[in-house]
């Protein structure tokens, strides 16, 4: 009788889980809270079924629920890996899932590059359609002072390229069961990611143009800002991997969590190279450079 229930395949049949429905609920509350938060910031009203929701707390509740689901769901995944559920077939499917996620992220950034190139290659149409402050039919629009690409942006480029090197060092150290090299490489990568975010925050604080003042500012901050958000997410991803490495979770043969983080980080590196050359260098070519 026991043989009838014995597992004789490489697939992982997941036990009933509360995480999918809780994730959907958290995402819905956070989306609803985002609308109510924006109404609150603009001094407006947002009533649902007679309840006034124009406040920031609905968003924070949804956000907290999403974070809880992320922690619980990924903790279950780590537990399943330790129990041997991540067989050869399951590991392959996890890799397919990460590849598809990165492919969706590529298309996400394609949209922002498309918006930037549409505005820069057809400035008359973009500037007229935007109804924003600057005019002139040129790109960057007349009156815009751009950031010097050979100042803070080139520093951040070097930082990210170095971080790509250190995360690769950590990966090779893990493959050779070098725990010290793994932890050192991950620590340096996390620190470099934090340094990149700090430099970009300083750059934004001293930018000579604003998000809402021109089509140049809007497209610049959307593209580089979303990349900055991805750097922040990737830094957290790698920091979690560092904690797991310190706990001894990864082995040379089973470490997909770290491998997925490394893939994501290399993707962030490549996107930045395109941003640097297309937006900072080519996009600001010939325009006056802001002092300082």
Image (spheres, helix red, strand yellow):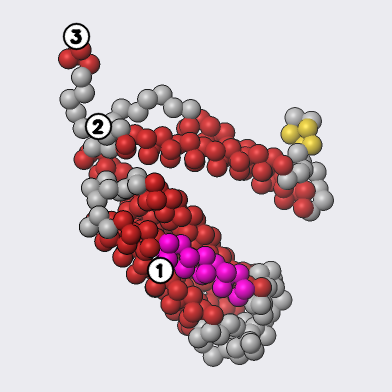
Residue at the spot x=35%, y=28% of the render? 14
Q: Is residue 54 above or below residue 135?
A: above
Residue 117, given in percent of the width and then of the height, sits at 49, 73
Image location (x, y in percent) of residue 212:
69, 69
The image shows residue 9, relative to residue 190, as above or below, that is above
CA gap between label 1 and label 2 equals 36 Å
Please state if 145 lies on the left or on the right of 20 as rendered. right
* Lower sequence index among marks 3 and 1: 3
Mark 1 and mark 2 lie on one chain; the one further toward the N terminus is 2
The residue tagged with tag 3: helix, strand or loop?
Answer: loop
- Give the dominant element type of the magenta stretch: helix, strand or loop: helix
Q: Position of residue 82 (x, y in %)?
A: 32, 36
Residue designated by label 1: 163
Q: Position of residue 126 (x, y in %)?
A: 59, 73
Query: Is residue 199 magenta-colored?
Result: yes
**Residue at x 43%, y 50% (from the top left corner):** 243
- Disc 1 is placed on an element classified as helix
Pointer 3 residue = 1
In the displayed structure image, the side of residue 125 where residue 181 appears, left or right: left
Please report the bounds of the magenta region as a residue range: 187-203
Residue that lies at the very extreme toward the front in this rendered image: 180
| Label 2 with label 3: CB-CB less than 8 Å | no
What residue is pinned by disc 2? 11
Residue 217 seen anywhere in this rendered image of the structure: no
């Amino acid at each position: 009788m026991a043989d009838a229930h014995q597992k004789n395949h490489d697939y992982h049949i997941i036990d009933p889980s509360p995480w999918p429905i809780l994730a959907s609920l958290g995402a819905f509350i956070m989306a609803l809270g985002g609308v109510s938060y924006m109404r609150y910031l603009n001094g407006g009203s947002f009533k649902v079924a007679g309840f006034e929701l124009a406040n920031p707390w609905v968003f924070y509740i949804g956000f907290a629920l999403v974070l809880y689901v992320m922690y619980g769901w990924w903790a279950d995944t780590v537990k399943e890996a330790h129990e041997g559920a991540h067989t050869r077939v399951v590991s392959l499917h996890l890799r397919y899932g990460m590849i598809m996620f990165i492919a969706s992220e590529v298309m996400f950034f394609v949209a922002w590059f498309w918006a930037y190139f549409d505005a820069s290659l057809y400035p008359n149409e973009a500037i007229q359609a935007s109804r924003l402050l600057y005019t002139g039919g040129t790109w960057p629009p007349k009156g815009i002072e751009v950031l010097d690409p050979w100042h803070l942006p080139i520093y951040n480029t070097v930082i990210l390229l170095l971080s790509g090197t250190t995360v690769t060092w950590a990966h090779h150290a893990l493959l050779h069961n070098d725990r010290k090299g793994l932890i050192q490489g991950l620590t340096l990568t996390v620190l470099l990611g934090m340094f990149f975010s700090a430099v970009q925050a300083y750059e934004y604080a001293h930018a000579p143009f604003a998000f809402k003042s021109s089509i140049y500012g809007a497209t610049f901050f959307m593209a580089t800002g979303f990349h900055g958000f991805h750097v922040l997410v990737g830094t957290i991803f790698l920091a979690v991997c560092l904690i797991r490495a310190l706990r001894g979770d990864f082995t040379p043969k089973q470490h997909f969590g770290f491998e997925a983080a490394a893939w994501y980080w290399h993707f962030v590196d490549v996107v930045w190279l395109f941003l640097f050359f297309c937006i900072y260098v080519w996009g600001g070519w010939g325009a006056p450079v802001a002092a300082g």
